Image: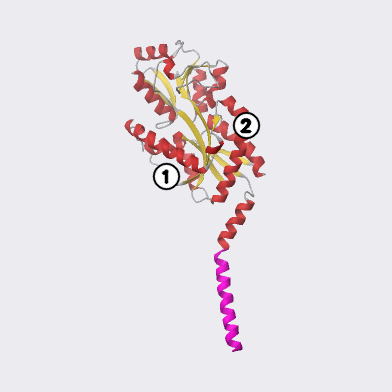
């Protein structure tokens, strides 16, 4: 009886031990999330330094450093309309230490233009919507045309001679340039750049005639008079620059585009880590100093209730449903 009792007790102990071991991964994950982060976090910006994406991300990263108590490092990985940098995020370890900035071009249009090695919906975990804003149609300051109607008249008289800066096939700049041509009956010659900052530099230098760019890249130069602003791509005037007419007022009705941005992590990043990243992002977007700087860039944060992983996922799905038929109709598929 004594031996049998010992054997029974031993068997029960083993079963308890096995059951306890089964719960270890969940406990370890929870403990990891509670201590996260324990080292610097990297945010990959898929464009060169100095552009709107880089400016906004660096501003948020500095504030997120306070929330985390660890540095938040920016790594610029440019090329192929942002798809190279986004691919780096998709392949990163799903531990919350590498996340990425993205926008309409990288997470909506690129799958229609490029053969990607990742899925823009299924290979990422959404973290938070960041900012939104219309874009500006700008031109070199030495352009003789004083407004958009004069510029369109010149383009019609000189087909193919006007140079427009783009970030490659499928980028927002490229798609908007194509829509501009379709709506105005003009023909432009595209010049491709790796990012908005180098494209703007060539507009400033007079090497290209026009661009359709994010205010975070070009608005300070518009305000200083270095480049011209012909119109804003919205139905209403831009609060950050009320003197710039809408595309309707400027003579190109229908050329509407609202840019938006977000943070994503690799697929299978733990939900509690995503929650920590989202909370730090929300804190950054609520900081008065950050809001003031964003206003200087012409960027408006999404409302607090939309700064969630769920809202970013829903927003991206809606944008895909809206824009993929338009992009496919442009027949801009490129391998």
Q: Nearer the viewer, mark 1 or mark 2?
A: 2
* Residue 118 as seen in the image, left or right of residue 48: left
Q: Is residue 7 magenta-colored? A: yes
Residue 187 screen position, x and y as percent: 35, 20
Give the magenta-colored segment's residue range: 1-23
Element type at mark 1: loop
Residue 2 screen position, x and y as percent: 61, 88
Residue 24 showing in the rendered view? yes
Image quadrant where one finds the C terminus: top left
Residue 154 screen position, x and y as percent: 38, 12
* Residue 332 as seen in the image, left or right of residue 226: left
Q: Is residue 87 magenta-colored? A: no
Label 1, residues with CA under 10 Å away: few <14, some 14-19, many ≥20:
few
Q: Which residue is mark 2?
A: 290
Residue 150 screen position, x and y as percent: 41, 11
Task: Name the residue at the front extreme.
Answer: 305
Of labels 1 and 2, earlier in sequence is 1
Q: Which residue is mark 1?
A: 119
Q: Provide the major secondary structure of the magenta segment.
A: helix
Q: Depth check: 301 or 169 in front?
A: 301
Residue 1 in which image quadrant: bottom right
């Amino acid at each position: 009886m004594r031996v049998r009792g010992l054997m029974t007790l031993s068997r029960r102990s083993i079963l308890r031990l096995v059951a306890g071991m089964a719960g270890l991964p969940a406990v370890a994950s929870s403990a990891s999330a509670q201590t996260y982060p324990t080292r610097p976090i990297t945010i990959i910006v898929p464009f060169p330094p100095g552009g709107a994406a880089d400016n906004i991300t660096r501003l948020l990263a500095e504030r997120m450093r306070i929330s985390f108590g660890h540095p938040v490092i920016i790594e610029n990985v440019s090329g192929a309309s942002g798809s190279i940098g986004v691919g780096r995020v998709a392949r990163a370890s799903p531990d919350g230490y590498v996340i990425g900035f993205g926008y309409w071009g990288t997470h909506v249009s690129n799958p229609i233009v490029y053969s990607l090695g990742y899925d823009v919906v299924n290979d990422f975990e959404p973290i938070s919507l960041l900012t939104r804003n219309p874009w500006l149609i700008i031109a070199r300051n030495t352009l003789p045309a004083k407004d958009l109607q004069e510029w369109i008249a010149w383009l019609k008289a000189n087909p193919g001679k006007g140079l427009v800066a783009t970030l490659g096939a499928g980028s927002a700049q490229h798609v908007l340039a194509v829509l501009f041509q379709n709506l105005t009956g003009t023909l432009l010659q595209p010049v491709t750049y790796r990012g908005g900052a180098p494209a703007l530099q060539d507009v400033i230098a007079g090497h290209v005639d026009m661009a359709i760019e994010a205010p975070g890249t070009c608005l300070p130069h518009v305000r200083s008079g270095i480049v011209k602003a012909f119109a804003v791509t919205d139905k209403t005037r831009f609060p950050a620059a009320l003197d710039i007419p809408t595309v309707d007022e400027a003579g190109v009705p229908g050329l509407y585009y609202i840019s938006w941005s977000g943070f994503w992590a690799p697929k299978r990043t733990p939900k509690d880590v995503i929650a920590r990243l989202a909370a730090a992002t929300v804190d950054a977007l609520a900081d008065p100093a950050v809001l003031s700087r964003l206003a200087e860039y012409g960027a408006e944060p999404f409302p607090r209730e939309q700064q969630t992983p769920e809202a970013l996922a829903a927003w991206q799905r809606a944008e895909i449903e809206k824009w993929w038929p338009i992009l496919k109709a442009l027949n801009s598929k490129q391998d």
